[in-house]
Amino acid sequence: MARADAALRKPRRAAPAAAFFTPETFRPEQGVLYLLRKAMVRLSQSVNREMAMEESTLPQWLPLFKVWKCDASTVADLARQCCIDVSAMTRLLDRLEKKGLVRRARCAADRRVVRIVITPEGQAVAERVPAVLCGVYNRALAGFTAQEWAQLQSLAERLRANAEAMAQELGVPT
């Protein structure tokens, strides 16, 4: 019985990867990264346009929204949650601060910590994010059935989990 219990607790290994790609027939524009990046860039451009942040090289609305929702309050927290490095997040926050959307404030308890605080102007922008994202996403999913959308979510989540497992195997910090 103990052996059966141990077998149930042991994590399952993913099935061996199918050879969807081969060097002989590989075309970058059919690759996973290319297709995902192309979709992400176009969706980001639409959101930036509707948020009136077209000059942004990185989506400025994401950290703004995360600060507003109290999901993150420091540069390191925001960088981690937005999947970019700290130096890129610092530059992005510099632009948001210059626009008057956020400000930096030293933590009273620990002066080494710098908190990101949203301004009233930034809150007004952040409050628009859910409606803009819903509109852009719904237009991008035009023609999908509810079942196709659920399948896309499931497949994307599986791809994310596989990619994270690969990164862990390589010792890449998450």
Image: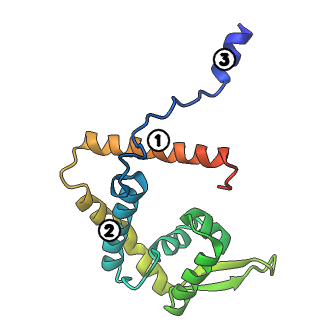
Task: Name the N-terminal-most of marks 3 and 1.
Answer: 3
Q: Position of residue 163 (x, y in %)?
A: 54, 47
How far apart marks 2 and 1 lie (CA) works out to 23 Å
Label 2 sits on residue = 42
Which one is in front, 168 or 116?
168
Q: Position of residue 150 (x, y in %)?
A: 33, 42
Q: Quadrant of the C terminus?
A: bottom right
- Mark 2 is surrounded, within 10 Å at the Cα level, by few (under 14), some (14 to 19) or many (20 or more) other residues, namely few
Q: Is residue 73 visible?
A: no
Q: Quadrant of the N terminus?
A: top right
Which one is in front, 38 or 108?
38
Q: Is residue 107 visible?
A: yes
Q: Is residue 167 above or below residue 107?
A: above
Q: Amino acid at mark 2?
A: Arg
Which one is in front, 12 or 5?
12
Quadrant position of residue 80: bottom right
Q: Residue at x 76, y 77 (%)?
A: 113
Residue farthest to the front? 24
Q: Please tell me whether mark 1 sits on a helix, a strand or a loop.
A: helix
Q: Is residue 69 left or right of residue 110?
A: left
Task: Name the N-terminal-most of marks 2 and 1.
Answer: 2
Label 3 sits on residue = 7
